[in-house]
Image: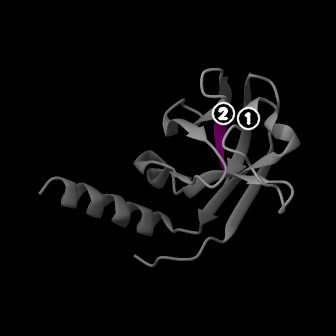
Amino acid sequence: MIITEPDIFVTLAVSNKPHYYTSTMLLNTPVKITCGYNTRNNMRWVIVTDINNTPVLPQTFLKQGKVCQFNFHANRLGLSYSITIKPKDKNFKISDEYDYLNWSNDFEMLFVGRSQSKENARDNNWRNVRVGNQ
């Protein structure tokens, strides 16, 4: 398998609604995104699914600097992506007590992907399963 540098960047605007749904296309594959807000830790969480509601990223908390990789199901779809949030202003400094409720003022959601052929994705999944079962 050839490992490539990220070459696909998809930026989405986020909403300040405590709970909402949106969708986008990643490499011609539609994905549904559910975003929510946790009042106990003042953080945002996200779930990304394919059109059949199969998670490619189970519920995960997002915060600045955290990068979350899509799961094996995404590889089967040919999606070699991770998700993170990036500040709108490069000079933005986040405090430990930052409340992500009104995150649209400060952040955008960023999907970072790598071009991958179906053969490479299938090869990668096969290797992962084979190694995991030995």
Q: Is residue 125 magenta?
A: no
Secondary structure mostly seen in the magenta stretch: strand
Three-letter amino acid code at the position of disc 2? Arg
Position of 77 with respect to 11 (left or right) is left
CB atoms at circles 2 and 1 under 8 Å apart?
yes
Residue sitting at x 27%, y 64%:
127
Q: Is residue 71 above or below residue 46?
A: below
The residue to which callout 1 is attached is 100
Q: Is residue 58 above or below residue 7?
A: above
* Label 2 secondary element: strand
Q: Position of residue 11 (x, y in %)?
A: 77, 53
Position of 23 with respect to 83 (left or right) is right
Answer yes or no: is residue 27 visible: no
Quarter of the image holding residue 86? bottom right
Q: Quadrant of the C terminus?
A: bottom left
Position of 87 with respect to 26 (left or right) is right
Residue sitting at x 45%, y 79%:
2
Q: Position of residue 79 (x, y in %)?
A: 55, 55
* Label 1 secondary element: helix
Q: Quadrant of the N terminus?
A: bottom left
Quarter of the image holding residue 16? top right
Which segment did they paint magenta? 28-32
Residue sitting at x 51%, y 68%:
117
